[in-house]
Each structure stands twice: as C-alpha cells, then as structure tokens.
Amino acid sequence: MSAPQHPNRRQLLQAGAAWSYLAPAWARAAAGAPRVALVVGNGAYPDAPLDNPANDARAMAKRLGGLGFEVLALRDARREQMLEAVQRLGSALARAPEGVGLLYYAGHGLQLDARNFMVPVDARLGSAADIARQTVDVGEVIAAFRKAATRVNIVVLDACRDNPFGGITSGRGLAPLDAPAGTFLAYATAPGNVASDGEAGSSHGLYTQHLLTELARPQARIEDVFKRVRFAVRRASKGAQIPWESTSLEDDFVFQQAQVVAAAPPPPQVLRQRFDAQAEAWDRIKDSRNPEDFFAFLQAHPTGPVAEAAHARLNQLARPALQVQEPGGTLQSFVVGRFLEGDRFEMLNRTRGLPGGGAPVRVVYQVRRVTPQRIEIDVDNSGMPAGQRRQLQVMDGAGGIVAMGEAMRFDPPQRLLPGGLLQVGERWESVARITQPSGALSGHLTRRGRITGREALQLPAGRFDTYRCESVETYLMPGVPEIPSTVVHWMSPGLALPVRTETRVRVPGLPTEIVNESELVALVRGR
C-alpha cells in the first residue's frame, strides 16, 4: 500500500479550525462531580476521506452538552491537537474526584498488538512503525480517566468505517479489549469488523445515527441505550454490523441526568414481577417466524427476564452475517458454540458437603439430533437409579433448555448465558415458567448473571480458554423454600456446553455448604 500524500493547504486549514470550534463547545455541567466528554470527529483524510464524522461529532457534542456534560469537541484534528485535548480532559476531571469521563471518537481507527488507535487527519502511515508516532492510543484517554479517579468512564468508538491501513495493522478493525475497572467500552461494530459510514442520504454514520436517537430517550440507562443501538444497527445493516460492548461498571449511569445510580441485584421475586410484566408480549410472539417481531420486542425491552430468550430467537431467525476475529488473542471467537450431531461430552461430577459424602459420578451428553429449531441430547447419569438413569434433554436451536426428561418443561427456554456474543461484563437475567407434561404450572426458575472474566483451564479433556459466567438461580415453587444457588459456568467459545461448572448452595439444617463440581473429561466432536 502506498503511503498517503501530504494534505494540501486547504485541508491543513480545515484541521487547524478544530480549536476554533473548541471554545464554544464547553457546556455548563449540573452541580456535583464533573462530567466531561471529549468528542472527536475526523473525516478530512487526504487519501481516505469520510463524509460523516464531522457531522457526527457536532451532533454528539450538542447532545451530550444538553445532558449535563462539559464537552471538549474537535473536528478534523491533527495529532498534536488530539493529545492536547486528552490533557485538558484529564485536567477538567481532576477538579473533583468521582467524576464521569466520556470519549466519543468517529473516524478511522486501527489496531496494533492488541491496542486501538485513533487516526488524526495529518497521519501519514506507511508502516507499522508509524502508528505509535502518528496516531493517538485510546489507552491514553483511559489512563487520563484513571489518573483523575473518575467513578464512571465511557468510551465510544465509531471507527473502522473502512480500513485504508490494512497492510500495516495486526488485524482488521479494532482489537477486542476487556473494560478496565469502572469503564464502559462501546464499539460501533464487533472487533475485527468494519462499520458503515452511513446510509445513502444520511448525514451520520449508521451507529451514531441510532446512538443520537437513543440518548434522547428520557431516563436512558447506559445498558438500555447501547443494547437498543445494537439491535437497531443490526436490523438496519441486515446483520452485517453488530455493535459490541464490554463493561466493568458496577453502577448504572443515567444519561438524562448524567448521574450515577447504585445498582442492586434484583431478588428472585422482583425478577418474577418483571417477567409477569413482559410475559403477555412474549406469548404473542414466541412462536413467530418473523424477525421483525423480535426486533420490536427488544427495542421495547432491551433488558429484562425475557430479553435473552428474544435475542436467542432472533439469532435463529436472522443469523448475523458476522465473523469475529481476535488476532493475537487467546480466544478464537466471542461466539457461543453450536452443537453437532454426534457430539459427546463426558463430565465427571463431584459433590462435597452432603452427609456421608458421595462418590464421583460420570454424566455423558450425547447429541443425537440437531435441527435449526430443536436439539435432542441423551443424558446418561451413572449416579441415578437404573430406571431414571437416562433422560432426554431438549433444547431450542439457540441452546435454551426446553425440557429436562419428563419432569420439567421451560417457557421461555431456560438460558444459562446471554443470548448474544460472549462479552466480559455482560449482565443478563432470565425467568422461565416451569410446567409439567400435563401443562400444569409448577413454578418459575429465575436467574441473574454476569460474565466476569476470562480464564485458561487445564482439564482432563484438554486445555481450554474460557469465559467465566457467574449467576444466581432460584426456584420459585409453591411449598418449596427459596434457596438460591450460586453457579459458575466456564464457557469455551466453539463449544455449546460448559467445560466446567461449580454450583454452591446452603441448605437450612445442613452444617456446611453443598458444592457440586463438574468438569469435562472427554470430548468427541460430531460424527
């Protein structure tokens, strides 16, 4: 690839005008801890210009200013201007602790050695060695947040609208990053993919167009905002572009008041109440084969106890046209694996804390049938009495449990994981009605969880790079005490069952906690 040519004098003057836009871009913040946003839109690249970043930055600066942020805005900025703006951002946030820092960037972006870089308009990149010297590392902004002791950091990257620098980077698109403490990372598209610079006739990039809409909603919670954007962009791009987020936030952030709200985990009965509020809408569409029904449901209910079931159903009906890459990373994919006919998972279960102890038990899962709508698995549990040892587990095409033997059926299907990509920080909650084969309602199973990190495991079946998925599940059944279980699933991308599971429960009347551990000891893929 030939190196970009030097910008002409008019382009340099346009870039120099960025600071003239800076002064009036500061908006008066509400009382309290500082909330400061750095908004950058770069489009006037000499060899690879983009139509919409300057418009995106102007509109985003106005919207964030109206939401109580002080806004430092740059358009078509040179590297020197961007670095100075990062310093000003840190200084503004350092005026008081516990503030909120936000970076919004629209323009060209690239990755090198698991780091992401924003490209100034004066960058002339001919080799990988030029990147560190001529671009701005997103990590420098995050470091400024950390130094200022902010309480909440938000980084929005509407970059990779195309990639004129593919020959010098370590991968296509941006690199996947797990959010540092107190940080919400939002990408316009999944790592390793390219975002749209906008539809014909639009003055905004596809991602920013929908983000501006969602930020205008009253009482917009950060999680709801970005999930709604994700579904809207996925719908508009027909699955070619799916935004991606990673979060380590422990609190909720509400954009309308620009305030942080302590988030408490909902108890099981509250989850049940949320489910009841969405159940009627779910029952109307659950058997639909029209993806639009599920897009509409998720726009109305982006989070909640039915959202993951709706998301999974949407994936069945409108499979994303998306490939996720992690060059140089330890995980091959963010995508939850799929079953193959003939898959055989052999697990070894050990239980501690029961009176009299217990011998290890082998459980074999043999996948006997896979269709787009239904998965049938023979479960052979050597620890059960002879007449109950084998049962059929039925799942929907997206891996939600529909039935376990003859005893339990679940509606919506019981989901162990979020319905989308595996992303560190992703939270989910679910409620499933439990019915008997006769159709009589037996109760509800509630679950709330979060993907808390990545771990490498060495198991008898081999070495696996995994996502650690933690949840709390509770059965709500008449006459049965509410006894929550803490469950950890270790999911390896490419496999549809956990490679390791740990369940902990404290039963009244027993002196110690009961701990069940299950690990993969043998694996055969397909026939």
Image (cartoon, rainbow, N blue to C red):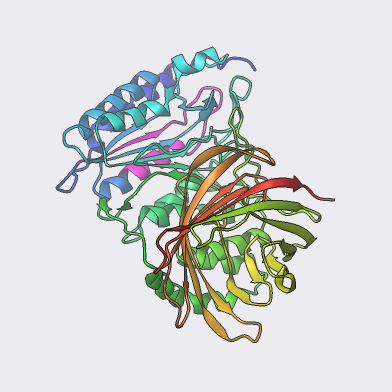
Which one is in front, 234 or 357? 357
Q: Where does the magenta region start and end?
A: 34-61
User: In this view, which residue lies farthest toward the right?
Assistant: 527
Q: From the top left corner, tell me how far across and down residue 416 is, in percent.
A: 56, 59
Residue 356 screen position, x and y as percent: 53, 61
Spot occupied by residue 81 in the image (x, y as percentages of width and height): 33, 22
The reply to whether the magenta stretch includes residue 328 is: no
Task: Assign the N terminus to one quadrant of the image.
Answer: top right
Number of labelled discs?
0
Residue 198 in view here: yes
Residue in view at x 30 percent, y 33 percent = 145
Q: Residue at x 73, y 54 (%)?
A: 339
- Residue occupying image coordinates x 60% and y 66%: 292
In the image, is 153 to the left or to the right of 26? right
The residue depicted at 30 percent of the width and 22 percent of the height is 84
Q: Quadrant of residue 492?
A: top right
Q: Return the residue nearer the eye: 242 or 507.
A: 507
Residue 207 is left or right of residue 86, and the answer is: right
